[in-house]
Image (tube, coloured by chain):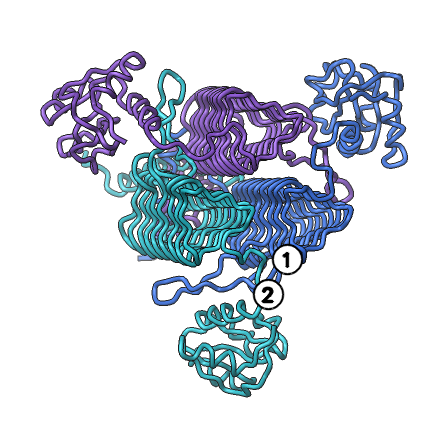
Chain colours: A blue, B cyan, C purple
């Protein structure tokens, strides 16, 4: 786990550019954040707000944007690139290749249960104790970690990464109420997952009721996310942990949903909609933008008083109106 | 995957009634929503608000209520029944029987680990890589998908469906604080699940501390739900995804909890209580009805201003009171 | 499953003290809550608010604090101890030892997949269908239930309990946005879990991006919790079910987070911070205390009116200010 700085810059040059100022023979032994980096570490400045850390950092080399070139050169070696965070991402990928591989580098782990009617691309890797039911399809270079279930007829595209415990294609939650009981609606659709999708640990994507649940290319789902039946998630949208998307919701492309956000069923979100953490989307959003709905946290005693007032809010609004009317009337009394 | 319309109506007639208007020889190749149905598809109108779609639909046949019989007949074949959504649910069940079975149709999959002290009804099906500990009991015709754990002494009734990744009977979260550390309270109860219960993927139901956690007949739990120890959920109650029910809560029968709702511990909810998504139940609810508590979502800039005001709300209330008192006083000054 | 009362008190005396008043020969057949205890059951009064149940209880013996000694003696046998709930916790542990063991009492279940490069202490127990990748370390007397994944290089301390479905060391959620797509940041850190940690079913703890995600000694995590990359949780902190902690958050020691709470990324919580259920921590909290932020639940119709007013709140605040200014001006008109 050591790379010459010159080797790093050389390996990435064709892919992402970047210019080294300093000694390419410096041996890098780790990638580190600015505040804990040491003399043989490579670090990065991704956002101007951390610039105070730049001068103080002990990093052997720092990846910076052109705006910070002089500041960075003043303290030692640096790599200058238009997008330091993206460059850093590429460095992590290069670094990964120098590390020992995990055990599950076989095509299909012997403990995995792959239906003879499933189709797994020869370049894909299926980890220990995965279950692929009949009709499941796994694309080229996709990697399934351990203990993943891919249900009947569900498809995963190329270059996808699925983490442990993922369940693709469990039944959607569909019942018709009848005479006080819930009559099951059989879930006859499947799940279709595009290319370059990453799905976090223990996340669930239900099969559609009649048609398919669809996750488009480049979507990133964090851990413990629930995607209901018939949901459609547009390309390059990212959902943070613990998000829940109810059935038949349609989320656009290039959206982000913060952790714990909830999207109610049958709604539509336009492209480039950004939902803050823990916010509840209760109506369709047709305009790109940033939306939030969460009760501000406060000391409990203050919250108790304010929350009690929230329950009086409509009443308070009426009382303000009455006060306004009174004053208006006092200033302009009706003619006698 | 094709059924004559007459065969569908005939198969369901004894069970749910329903009368066909149109040609019973039409071959149905799929079940579809109104807006995407094609000429050989069977669709349904479950709610009057979708009636605009009825006239426009290309469906070969539509299931409707008597109120829409004329409208439906005017456009082609239809099945008239009192409860179209329930009828449709029954059609999906019929349709399911025509499909290829998933692989796990054996009684107990050879990869499942079933304790010799577990009791599995001969008609039940235990999927791949399930773990049934000693004393576990699985009732007649129940189906466990893949990778499910049923803990020691936990019981599942008849005709239940458990989806992949479910954990029944992990320890409840019980600790006594003592001298700054948490002392474990051993969880000595179990979990008892009634008949006709469906449990979604990766959902967890903890064993009771002293007595059992109880899920009554006909309860439907969606994915990624957490049910704490000693909880009691009444018959035919349905919980949507990502719900959390804290320990010792008692939820009545015929309740519904929306996605992401949280019920605090030791509370009681009456029968027929309906909680909106993402709402937090902080006190017992003794009256049937519909309850909600969520911060309305808004554009982030508007939210920021309003959320700041929420933290002033108790203060604002006092200022309104002062204004009211001032005006009252000004109108009725005390006698000199 | 029966112990003489005297044997229970004797076994715990050296550990936690406690004095029996009554007949030590009473045979205890179960531990029960006060309200359902019967003549051969041992119960406890943990909080004065339940004292009404004490006189009514049918329990054969009740564990009480000195303040309730007389009341308890008046109704039958009792054990008097400074901290009845802690004493009760110890009784449950004693009771557990009398019960049949679960099946997975072997060192490493034959169905578990343990990398030759993993290190499992000889006293640890690894349950069925667990996956331990290379470099994983499990400490002395730790117990992994079933179907748990411990990722590459992740370590678990001594005396830990991990429940079924846990995933330790999946990739953190790290991507650099670039030209409209998400470029993966390889997650090069690991997870380090201290001693005496308990982790609930299907909970996920992600590996760090560059450094390790750290869970300190004595931490208790309930089910379905998401811990993001680089998070640091201080000793003896407890998180209830469905909590989500975003990346790089630092939570102090002796904190508690209620069910469904969300902590945003890169925040710091001091020691002894207590967050109510379903509250969203949006800024660092540097002062010990109890913090809350949740919309109060109400009948839906009332909520609808109040929620609508919330969206007018900043406007209402301005109108109150205007009223105040008007009245001030009316009372103190500027000099002519």
| Secondary-structure class at tag 1 | loop
Q: Is residue A223 above or below residue A249?
A: above
**Whole-Å distance between the Cαs marked 1 and 2?**
9 Å
- Quarter holding residue C153: top right
Q: Where residue C113 sits in the image (x, y, percent)?
A: 61, 34
Q: Where residue C81 sits in the image (x, y, percent)?
A: 23, 17
Q: Alpha-carbon neighbours of circle 2 within 10 Å: few (<14), some, or many (≥20)?
A: few
Q: Quadrant of the C terminus of chain A?
A: bottom left
User: Mark 1–mark 2 contact, CB under 8 Å?
Assistant: yes
Residue at the spot 43% in from the left edge and 39% down from the top edge: C294
Residue at the spot 48% in from the left edge and 49% down from the top edge: B241
- Residue A43 in view here: yes
Q: What chain letter is assigned to the residue under label 1?
A: A
Instruction: Give the residue at the far front of this rendering.
Output: B116
Q: Alpha-carbon neighbours of circle 1 within 10 Å: few (<14), some, or many (≥20)?
A: many
Mark 1 lies on residue: A134
- Quarter holding residue B189: top left
Q: Are marks 1 and 2 on the same chain?
A: no
Q: What chain letter is assigned to the residue under label 2?
A: B
Residue at the spot 20% in from the left edge and 18% down from the top edge: C80
Q: Where residue C239 sits in the image (x, y, percent)?
A: 46, 30
Left or right of residue A336: residue C28:
left
Mark 2 lies on residue: B100
Front residue of C297 and C97: C97
| Secondary-structure class at tag 2 | loop
Front residue of C250 and B39: B39
- Quarter holding residue B218: bottom left
């Amino acid at each position: 786990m050591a790379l010459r700085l010159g080797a790093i810059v050389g390996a990435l040059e064709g892919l992402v550019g970047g210019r080294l100022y300093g000694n390419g023979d410096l041996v890098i032994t780790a990638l580190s954040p600015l505040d804990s980096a040491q003399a043989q570490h490579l670090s990065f400045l991704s956002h101007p707000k951390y610039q105070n850390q730049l001068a103080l950092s002990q990093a052997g080399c720092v990846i910076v944007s052109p705006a910070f070139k002089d500041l960075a050169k003043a303290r030692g070696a640096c790599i200058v690139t238009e997008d330091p965070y993206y460059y850093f991402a590429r460095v992590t990928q290069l670094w990964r290749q120098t590390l020992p591989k995990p055990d599950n580098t076989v095509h299909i782990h012997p403990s995995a249960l792959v239906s003879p009617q499933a189709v797994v691309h020869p370049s894909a890797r299926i980890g220990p104790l995965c279950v692929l039911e009949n009709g499941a399809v796994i694309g080229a270079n996709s990697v399934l970690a351990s203990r993943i279930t891919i249900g009947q007829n569900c498809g995963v595209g190329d270059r996808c990464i699925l983490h442990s415990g993922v369940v693709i294609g469990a039944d959607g939650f569909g019942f018709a109420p009848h005479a006080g009981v819930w009559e099951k609606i059989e879930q006859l659709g499947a799940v279709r997952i595009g290319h370059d999708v990453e799905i976090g640990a223990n996340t669930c994507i239900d099969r559609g009721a009649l048609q398919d649940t669809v996750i488009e290319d480049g979507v990133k789902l964090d851990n413990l996310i629930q995607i209901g039946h018939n949901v459609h998630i547009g390309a390059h949208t990212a959902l943070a942990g613990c998000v829940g998307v109810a059935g038949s919701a349609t989320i656009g492309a290039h959206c982000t949903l913060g952790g714990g956000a909830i999207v109610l069923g049958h709604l539509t979100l336009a492209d480039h909609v950004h939902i803050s953490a823990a916010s509840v989307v209760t109506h369709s959003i047709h305009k790109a933008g940033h939306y939030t709905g969460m009760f501000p946290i406060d000391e409990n005693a203050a919250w108790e008083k304010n929350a009690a007032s929230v329950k009086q809010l409509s009443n308070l609004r009426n009382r303000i109106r009455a006060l306004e009317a009174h004053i208006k009337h006092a200033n302009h009394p009706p003619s006698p």
